[in-house]
Amino acid sequence: MFNRFTRGTVTISVATVTGLVLSTLPAVPMQSELLQPPPRLGDTAAIQIRVDNPQVKPTVKIGAQTYPAYLVSGNRYRAFIPSTPLEKPGVRNVEITADGKTQQIPVNFADRQFRIQRINLPPGKAGVQATEYELKRVAALKATVSPIKFWNGAFQAPSKAPTSTPFGVKRYYNGKFANDYYHRGLDYAGAVGSAVTAPAAGKVVMVGYVKDGFRVHGNAIGVDHGQGVVSIFMHLSRIDVTEGMMVQPGDVIGAIGTTGASTGPHLHWGLYVNAVGVEPAQWRQTSFE
């Protein structure tokens, strides 16, 4: 959806895009345009905001939740609104404020069906609990927000293996339904030792090993792509990077394994936007500015 309004000396233009590249639309007063397809549950909506004064950073909110806006170029800002399979479909009223002027922009998240999967963990892995150290490290990764945008263009697949479990799947573990759970990523069914590569540029900010307490995630890598976008790679057999390293798309960072709470060899790639697990496939199909 594209909406534009002018009040006093402030002009705010907003575009929400899914599956399309953000573009600058002509500055025609009170023009609105819906760009299809609309975002679905689990997708990331991109909000583009144009202000008269680039020194005036806009605020973007839905209810009490604030989403950071980053300067893209000139007087254009961009904010990401993530959604999850646990939410209800429908309109989110996004409140945008700049220089004391406020406007609400409706963004509609379409419904989407997610599979149900039954997982039976083998003896020794059923009932495995994450350690406090593991939980703290992963929580810190998901909350990472860097002002710099490292990625450029659409993300690449982190493995050449075929995908197995898609994003958003609900699960029964050993016959018990996992409430408030959804599969926060994509699984790639590769052989042990096959390469895992960086899907986009970023900084390695987390490296975790089973021997150090990563019981559930297994050997894992966290990469900060910038501006609240981070990746996690789980169940690895090998890790080839260290914390602080910069990686580029296609760089080998590790290898597929079956460490942690895993029923067989695979890579779990999770993508988080503003600490929310979102559909990675959308980021492979969309070149977010």
Image (tube, rainbow, N blue to C red):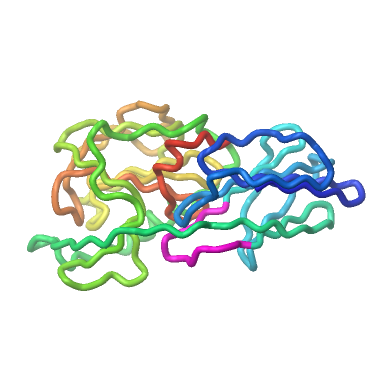
User: Is residue 251 positioned above or below 275 on the image?
Assistant: above
The residue segment tinted magenta is 81-92
Magenta stretch contains residue 91: yes
Can the viewer see residue 278?
yes
Hey, which quadrant is residue 114 in on the image?
A: bottom left
Q: How many marks?
A: 0
**Residue 195 is a magenta residue:** no
Residue 160 appears at what percent x and percent y? 26, 31
Picture quadrant where residue 280 is located: top left
Q: Nearer the viewer, residue 252 or 184?
A: 184
The percent coordinates of residue 208 (x first, y second) are 30, 47
Q: Is residue 164 left or right of residue 198?
A: left
Residue located at (32% from left, 46% from top): 186
Q: Is residue 187 left or right of residue 263?
A: right
Question: Residue 188 falls in which quadrant of the image?
Answer: top left
Tell me: 59 left or right of 36.
Answer: right
Closer-to-camera residue (25/42):
25
Task: Give the farthest residue toward the left.
Answer: 123
Which residue corresponds to the image point at 23% horizontal and 37% vertical from the top-left?
162
The C terminus, quarter of image? top right
